[in-house]
Amino acid sequence: MEQIQVELVNLVVAILTAFAGVATKYLVSFLKKKGLIAQIENNKELVKIVVQAVEQMYKELKGDEKLNLAKVEVMKLMQQKKIKMSEKELDLMIESIVKEMNDTAKSELKK
């Protein structure tokens, strides 16, 4: 009888240990995801600042010229802050911000 109780206690301890391991895995995964999302939002803000500055300062330039200038300036800023971003990610982020700016301008004109 005593041996059965010892085996049950060992089983319960093993189950609790496994549960704690699984819970820790999910918690770490969640925190990593949350940190990644925050990092992407911060990067987007930096890109947005540069795109708006290029748009305001270089109104005489055409679209492709502005895009290339914005890319160069963002890459400089990212290197200074030791942030890694691929050119494809940068292109997508710039396009997203330009679309937001155009949508905002269109909605303001409708008012």
Image (cartoon, grey):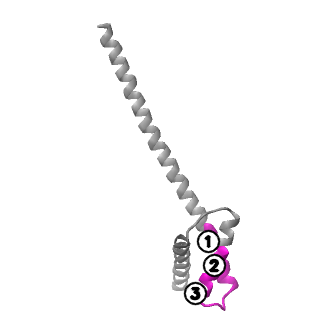
Q: Is residue 3 left or right of residue 19?
A: left
Crowd class of label 3 (few under 14; some 14 to 19; many from 20; radius 10 Å): few
Is 74 above or below relative to 23? Answer: below
Magenta run includes residue 66? yes
- Where residue 45 appears, as percent x and y from the top left, is 61, 67
Magenta run includes residue 3? no
- Residue 51 sits in quarter: bottom right
- Residue 101 sits in quarter: bottom right
Crowd class of label 2 (few under 14; some 14 to 19; many from 20; radius 10 Å): many
Q: Is residue 88 left or right of residue 79?
A: left
- Where residue 82 appears, as percent x and y from the top left, is 66, 62
Q: Where is mark 3, residue-wise?
A: 64
Q: Where is mark 2, residue-wise?
A: 70
Q: Earlier in the sequence, mark 3 or mark 1?
A: 1
Q: Earlier in the sequence, mark 2 or mark 3?
A: 3
Query: Are circles 2 and 1 on residues that touch, CB within 8 Å?
Result: yes
Please tell me whether the stretch drawn in magenta is mainly helix, strand or loop: helix
For the magenta stretch, what is the residue range?
45-74
